[in-house]
Image (tube, rainbow, N blue to C red):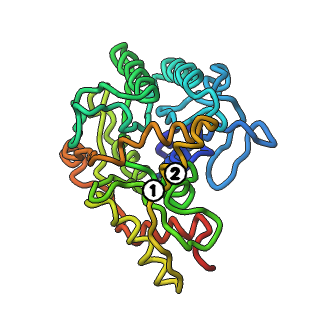
């Protein structure tokens, strides 16, 4: 019998980490999920081996990664507190574990790496000159993975638009456009009038990552890919999709502008709102990633129809009637 491929997902309790873990499991991988809170040191649940450990402790990551061909690094500090201080040491723990196992590291990338000189159409080889502190740290993360690959390892960066999905909580969809856990009466749109925006349905992102991992040996040691996802051409199509889904379920919601003025007032006293304000530039101009390289390798990009993806998301977030 063929031995199952093994993968460790660091940050498996989060949105993208959990989705990649489930998609790897469904593709036949033996999956471990590293999580901070667990009653037992190891628990088997939903076809995944959950391992208790802290991504800040290199020994925890190393132990969880034993025998793994792939490590998915999808972790953030608890509550995003001290993000700028902790993300690089967390990545170093993953790199050390991967070196010990000869494993491929997967990092879900962001558009924050790029600045105005790369807009509006971004390719994998576009210059990375970020205009925010968070973007600069993201560039450094990828530089360390590039160094890992140059030393004989493998790294895979998969970059996508703004996440949304049935189990994704920390994103613009569920923290900006709507409020989870209640019937939607108003949709707040952060986009400037007529400005396009790129969205990525998390299950699609994860499926494309799994497809790329199946071909990892044929990719360059440091491989980067952009997903096309759902392109909202004028900045209103996502909000309209939410409206359409609500109407099919007997509801309705008004469209309103996102209260940027209020965010600006409160931001000096709230770290999360300061970060939201820092990223406003991505809503004031069209920024679109080119998926041509992905199509050249896979032949297609997995993409769930927008209304279907929005309906599953709203259902998962508790915004539709049972």
Separation of residues labelled 1 and 2 (CA atoms): 6 Å
Q: Which mark is residue 203?
A: 1
Q: Position of residue 194 (x, y in %)?
A: 27, 59
Q: Position of residue 292 (x, y in %)?
A: 19, 46
Q: Quadrant of residue 41?
A: top right
* In front of the other: 35 or 251: 251
Mark 1 or mark 2: name the one nearer the start of the chain: 2
Q: Which mark is residue 19?
A: 2
Which residue sits at x=58%, y=53%?
169
Q: Is residue 30 visible?
A: no
In this rendering, is residue 222 above or below 275? above
Residue lying farthest to the top in this orientation: 151
* In front of the other: 265 or 52: 265
Rendered-image quadrant of the C terminus = bottom right
Q: Position of residue 75 (x, y in %)?
A: 56, 35
Q: Quadrant of residue 223?
A: top left
In this rendering, is residue 282 above or below 117? below
Residue lying farthest to the bottom in this orientation: 250
Which residue sits at x=64%, y=36%?
269
Q: Is residue 246 visible?
A: yes
**How busy is the neighbourhood of tag 1: few (under 14 within 10 Å), some, or many (20 plus)?**
many
Q: Are marks 1 and 2 in contact (CB under 8 Å)?
A: yes
Which residue sits at x=35%, y=43%?
282
Q: How many marks?
A: 2
Which residue sits at x=37%, y=55%?
191
Q: Which mark is residue 139?
A: none
Q: Is residue 114 left or right of 249 when viewed as pictured?
A: left
In this rendering, is residue 303 above or below 79? below
In this rendering, is residue 185 above or below 125? below
Label 2 SS: helix
Label 1 SS: helix
């Amino acid at each position: 019998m063929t031995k199952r491929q093994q993968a460790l997902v660091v940050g498996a309790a989060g949105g993208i980490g959990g989705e990649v873990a489930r998609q790897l499991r469904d593709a036949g991988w033996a999956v471990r999920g590293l999580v901070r809170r667990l009653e037992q040191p190891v628990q088997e649940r939903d076809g995944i081996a959950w391992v208790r450990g802290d991504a800040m402790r290199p020994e925890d990551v190393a132990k969880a990664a034993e025998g793994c061909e792939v490590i998915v690094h999808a972790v953030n500090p608890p509550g995003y507190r001290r993000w700028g201080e902790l993300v690089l040491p967390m990545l170093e723990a993953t790199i050390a574990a991967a070196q010990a196992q000869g494993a491929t590291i997967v990092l879900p990338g962001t558009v924050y790496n790029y600045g105005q000189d790369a807009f509006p159409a971004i390719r994998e080889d576009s210059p990375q000159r970020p205009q925010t502190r968070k973007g600069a740290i993201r560039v450094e993360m990828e530089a360390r993975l590039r160094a890992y690959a140059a030393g004989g390892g493998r790294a895979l960066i998969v970059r996508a638009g703004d996440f949304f999905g049935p189990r994704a909580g920390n994103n613009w969809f569920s923290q900006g456009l709507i409020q989870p856990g209640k019937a939607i009466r108003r949709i707040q749109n952060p986009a400037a009038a007529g400005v396009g925006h790129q969205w990525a349905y998390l299950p699609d992102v994860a499926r494309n990552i799994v497809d790329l991992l199946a071909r990892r040996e044929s990719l360059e040691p440091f491989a980067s890919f952009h997903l096309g996802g759902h392109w909202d051409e004028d900045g209103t199509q996502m909000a309209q999709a939410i409206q359409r889904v609500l109407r099919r379920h007997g509801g309705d919601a008004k469209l309103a502008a996102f209260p940027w003025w209020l965010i600006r007032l409160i931001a000096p006293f709230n770290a999360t709102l300061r970060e939201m304000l820092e990223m406003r530039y991505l809503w004031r101009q069209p920024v679109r990633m080119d998926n041509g390289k992905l199509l050249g390798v896979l032949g297609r990009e997995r993409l769930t129809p927008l209304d279907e993806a929005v309906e599953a998301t709203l259902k998962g977030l508790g915004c539709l009637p049972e």
